[in-house]
Image (spheres, coloured by chain):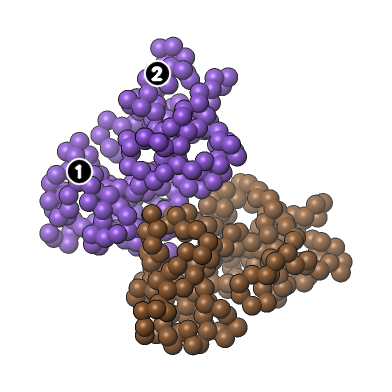
Chain colours: A purple, B brown
Amino acid sequence: MTTAIKTFPVAISARHIHLSEEDLQALFGPNATLTKDFDLSQPGQFAAKERVSIEGPKGIIHNVRVLGPVRAATQVEVSRTDAMKLGIYPPLRQSGDIDNSAGIKLLYGERELVIPQGVIIAQAHIHMTEEDAQALAVHNNEVVAVEVVSERPVTFRGVVVRVSNDFSLEMHIDTDEANAGFIEQQAQGKLVKASL
Amino acid sequence: MTTAIKTFPVAISARHIHLSEEDLQALFGPNATLTKDFDLSQPGQFAAKERVSIEGPKGIIHNVRVLGPVRAATQVEVSRTDAMKLGIYPPLRQSGDIDNSAGIKLLYGERELVIPQGVIIAQAHIHMTEEDAQALAVHNNEVVAVEVVSERPVTFRGVVVRVSNDFSLEMHIDTDEANAGFIEQQAQGKLVKASL
């Protein structure tokens, strides 16, 4: 393990939604497809031009970006700050793990759709390839600590490693984690130890 | 240094404002005084019933709590999330250090008051007495690291020690730091090392 590859870029995920084909049609109409706005750093993923509103018992948030491509199940990723504003209690989960997560109402124009589950707060994670994992001496699903240097330095101690050769090396945190650590896009994270 | 006293309660400071006597009168009228709502944990400090709105170039936040007693200078403490909503760029500072900090407009009913400086993001800090400082083996203004155990564990590495026998032992963080670490009122912090 060399020092050089112990750092990696940190990307900040704003609140967003992944839609199933069925929910996409329900909100945007029959035969609707997602329109790519720009590519995201993870291969094949893109930010769509489509936006929806999400409404909970206490509040509504507009202009939530839809990410593509469509997925098997609709998933909404919000920050804890968002959750408090909405009045919902989403669990901290890895992407895709939505059983018994929070529900929400999705709105687009006159159309609305209540999903009984699918809202999570995404656990901070590091996407990496098998080669990256070997170089960093970590394995898939390992929980590690990552420190970020900034004017308000924070170490995140519950960061999960996600290994796939479809990934490119990058850590993802949400806006609460970014704001707590005064972290801007393309900051560098440093793996400090396996931890909890 | 024993293990027992290495932990301390963590309190979450929501956005709030301290008013000077002059600014209190300007907003609430001649001879206005603050009405105590409840005592805060630091001796002599209280949450007042008075609330103001704060407005920046990009947005407004209502119902910002005034804390008492009045101070020599007006000071507004917001989170980075708040600052982004308001469209202002307050520096990270210790309480009282407001030279060249951000300005803001304060509003109460029909009255408004623009302050040219006074808005800060408060640096996380630990209030303690001389005796606490000795027990924790730290000194006034030392920057230390504090870890908090939670479902989303975070270590804050830029925490400043503030020693006065007028204080009671307690760490103060803002809402961004609390939400990043899933920290609830009366969580416990643990001093882990001197750091930056």
Q: Residue A87 location, x and y as percent?
A: 56, 42
Indicate the chain on which mark 2 is placed: A
Residue type at numbered disc 2:
Glu
Residue type at numbered disc 1:
Val
Q: Nearer the viewer, residue A6 or A110?
A: A110
Residue, x 34% and y 31% (percent of image)? A46
> Around disc 1, counting alpha carbons within 10 Å, would you say few (fewer than 14), some (14 to 19), or many (20 or more)?
many
Which residue lies under the disc numbered 2? A22
Both labels 2 and 1 in a single chain: yes
Q: Which mark is residue A103?
A: none
> Around disc 2, counting alpha carbons within 10 Å, would you say few (fewer than 14), some (14 to 19), or many (20 or more)?
some
Residue, x 75% and y 67% (percent of image)? B36
Q: Nearer the viewer, residue B52 or A22?
A: A22
Disc 2 secondary structure class: helix
Q: Residue B74 location, x and y as percent?
A: 69, 68
Rendered-image quadrant of the N terminus of chain B: bottom left
Residue, x 32% and y 42% (percent of image)? A94
Which residue lies under the disc numbered 1? A163
Q: Nearer the viewer, residue A43 or A70?
A: A70
Pointers 2 and 1 in contact (C-beta within 8 Å): no
* Residue B18 located left or right of residue B185: right
Q: Quadrant of residue B32?
A: bottom right
